[in-house]
Image (cartoon, rainbow, N blue to C red):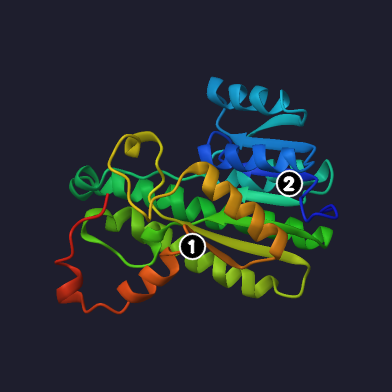
Amino acid sequence: MKDAFGAPQSLLVLGGTSRIALATARRLIALRTRTVRLAGRPSTALESAADELRELGAEVSTVEFDALDPESHASGLGKVFAEGDVDAVLLAFGVPGDQARDEEDPAAAALVARTNYVGAVSAGLVCAGALQAQGHGSLVVLSSVAAERARREDFIYGSSKAGVDAFAQGLGDALYGTGVQVLVVRPGSVRTGPTAGAPESALDTTPEEVADAIVTGLRRGSETVWVPGGLRVVMSALRHVPRPLFRRLPASR
């Protein structure tokens, strides 16, 4: 259960090497989260992430999880919930793809969709059912500002995130009143990996800022958070820009 400060005592991360997920885990451990399970494909990176969190004082274990293998989700994740209640699940896996390559290679584009959307639907439903069965908990779903409106430079990735976003909103409505919270997180361009070192924008963010927003959203029982918060206003305006004008807007990073 969550403590008096709204922090979960136990956390399951799907996408255990995600920088946003690990930043969130660090924040929650500082707020007395004691049990963390990092789920992902077996790798040295996953084990290193677990070691890092153990050094912060948490009990950490790794769980084999493959977004591209939905048939394994019920049994694999079911074992995690069988070990004890999970207070929060962070669905943080996904791939950005390569727009230019993926337009030329439909199979590669389909892989982006299968990972980001199909995998999220399968894992999300498994976790939602388990949280509902235990009567409490939060499911945090990492969406993206790219989900709000398809842009020329990333419409394959953006469409997969749009599907995840719509799924998570609908799931939250389905679970309303059950004791299970669904929190949709929509970050802007995250300054990490390939974007690090690029010119900064007021609408950019960092893994740490996204983590802070997630922790605040969990505490408040929010349904949606934007990171940074100003994105809500910007996207509200862009959503209504006519398509002929929208397609002429400069590309974002």
- Indicate whether 104 appears above or below 43: below
Q: Residue at x 39, y 41 (%)?
A: 191
Callout 2: helix, strand or loop? helix
Q: Position of residue 217 (x, y in %)?
A: 64, 60
Q: Within 10 angstroms of label 1, few (less than 14), some, or many (20 or more) residues?
A: some
Q: What is the x, y in percent for residue 218?
A: 68, 58
Foreground disc of the pair 1, 2:
1
Is residue 185 visible in the rendered structure shown here? Answer: yes
Amino acid beneath label 2: Gly
Q: CA distance from mark 1 to mark 2?
A: 35 Å
* 232 vs 10, nearest the viewer: 232
Residue sitting nearer the eye, 78 or 101: 101
Which three-letter amino acid code belongs to the residue tagged 1? Gly
Please tell me which of labels 1 and 2 falls first in the chain.
2
Percent position of residue 89, x then y = 67, 50
Is disc 1 placed on a helix, strand or loop?
loop
Question: Considering only vertical position in the picture, is 42 above or below 242?
Answer: above
Left or right: where 153 falls relative to 60: left
Q: Which residue is mark 2?
A: 78
For residue 69, say whether it is visible.
Answer: no
Badge number at residue 229: 1
Residue at 68% across / 41% down in the picture? 76
